[in-house]
Image (cartoon, rainbow, N blue to C red):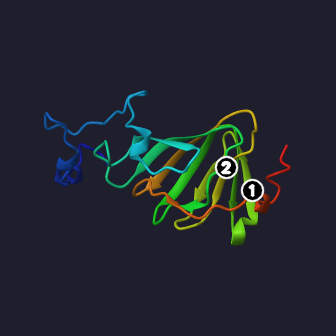
Amino acid sequence: MDPNSDNYERLDLSMYQNEAGLVVPFVTRGGHEPDAGATGQSEGATRVSGVSPQHTPATRIWFGKVHNLAGYRSVPHHHGDAETGGYVLSGRARIYFGQKFEDYIDMSEGDWVFVPPHMPHVECNLDRNNPLTWMTTRTPDNIVVNLPQVPESELRDWMNRP
């Protein structure tokens, strides 16, 4: 929207004002993100919040970086009402989904993924030697609902991955 237009003038942006009363972009400096424990987590995945309602004026988005150790696989989980978008920044990923997690899709650096709300899934790092890093965004917040664990042997092609 053009800040010089009449419509911009009529918007109530007071909730985004800084201490000086100005509406300006909010920057979270690298290395100064909130404690990773302040956002929803699954064992073995570290979710670091860059933009969230917890530490910025944002009200309808969570955007962060997710780091998975070599050979990592998450517990089954879903993200509640949140729509989730992901981008593989580095590494090779697999997401198991479907009835008993019998289906999967593989991704590599540069791939994008959308995970619908309430969809149970298992996130995996296919690489046994290198970490996997995702950029992830969710609306409205970083909701993580962990589900009961499934044995690795029940995840098709997981045990014999290259």
Report if the CB atoms under discs 2 and 1 are less than 8 Å apart: yes
Q: Is residue 28 above or below residue 146?
A: above
Residue 126 falls left or right of residue 122: right
Residue at horizontal 32 percent and vertical 46 percent from the top: 54
Q: Secondary structure at mark 2?
A: loop
Residue at horizontal 30 percent and vertical 45 percent from the top: 2
User: Is label 2 or label 1 in front?
Assistant: 1
Residue at horizontal 82 percent and vertical 51 percent from the top: 159
Q: Which residue was labeled with disc 1?
A: 152
Q: Is residue 14 above or below residue 48?
A: below
Image quadrant holding the C terminus, namely top right
Q: Quadrant of residue 63?
A: top left
Q: Which residue was labeled with disc 2?
A: 73
Q: Position of residue 41 (x, y in %)?
A: 49, 49
Mark seen at residue 133: none
Q: Quadrant of residue 69?
A: top right
At label 2, counting other C-alpha atoms closer than 10 Å, the crowd grade (few under 14, some 14-19, many 20 or more) is many
Q: Is residue 136 above or below residue 20?
A: below
Say what amino acid the circle numbered 2 marks.
Answer: Arg
Q: Secondary structure at mark 1?
A: helix
Residue 106 falls left or right of residue 1: right
Q: Position of residue 6 (x, y in %)?
A: 20, 51
Find the residue positioned furthest to the bottom.
99
